[in-house]
Image: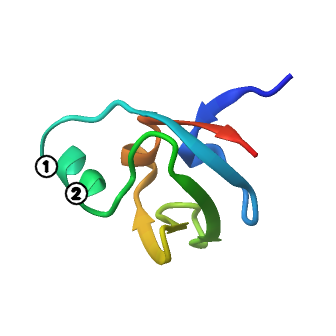
Amino acid sequence: MIENLSLNLLEIGQKAKVISVNTKGDIKRRLLDIGLIENTDVECVFKSPFNDPRAYFIKGATIALRNDDAKDILVRCI
């Protein structure tokens, strides 16, 4: 069974597909601008020494997101 989880829980090298983006305000606009929308593929590519922020490969670009923002993005592992 495939489970949904928050983006901030992906491990390095793990790939997922965005199910929903449950943020508001400026961060939601930023995420939409970089193409982080429903059905987008995303991969965790780097974790800082204290695991925050993490870097994700999204639509050909590497984007750093704080865990506080990434926790509101629901994904399904692929």
Q: Is residue 24 above or below residue 35?
A: above
What colouring style does the render use? rainbow
| In-image side of 68 versus 30 (left or right) | right
Q: Nearer the viewer, residue 48 or 14?
A: 14
Q: Quadrant of residue 43?
A: bottom right
Res 30 label: 2
Q: Quadrant of residue 13?
A: bottom right
Residue 41 at x, y percent in the picture: 58, 54
Q: Are marks 2 and 1 in contact (CB under 8 Å)?
A: yes
Name the residue located 58 percent from the left edge and 61 percent from the top edge. 51
Residue 27 at x, y percent in the picture: 22, 49
Residue 28 at x, y percent in the picture: 23, 44
Circle 1 residues within 10 Å: few <14, some 14–19, many ≥20: few
Residues at marks 2 and 1, CA–CA distance in whole angstroms: 6 Å
Q: Is residue 21 above or below residue 8?
A: above
Name the residue located 44 percent from the left edge and 46 percent from the top edge. 70
Q: Which residue is mark 1?
A: 26
Label 2's element?
helix
Name the residue located 57 percent from the left edge and 64 percent from the top edge. 50
Three-letter amino acid code of the residue under disc 2: Arg
| In-image side of 78 versus 8 (left or right) | right
Query: Which residue is the extreme one toward the bottom?
Result: 61
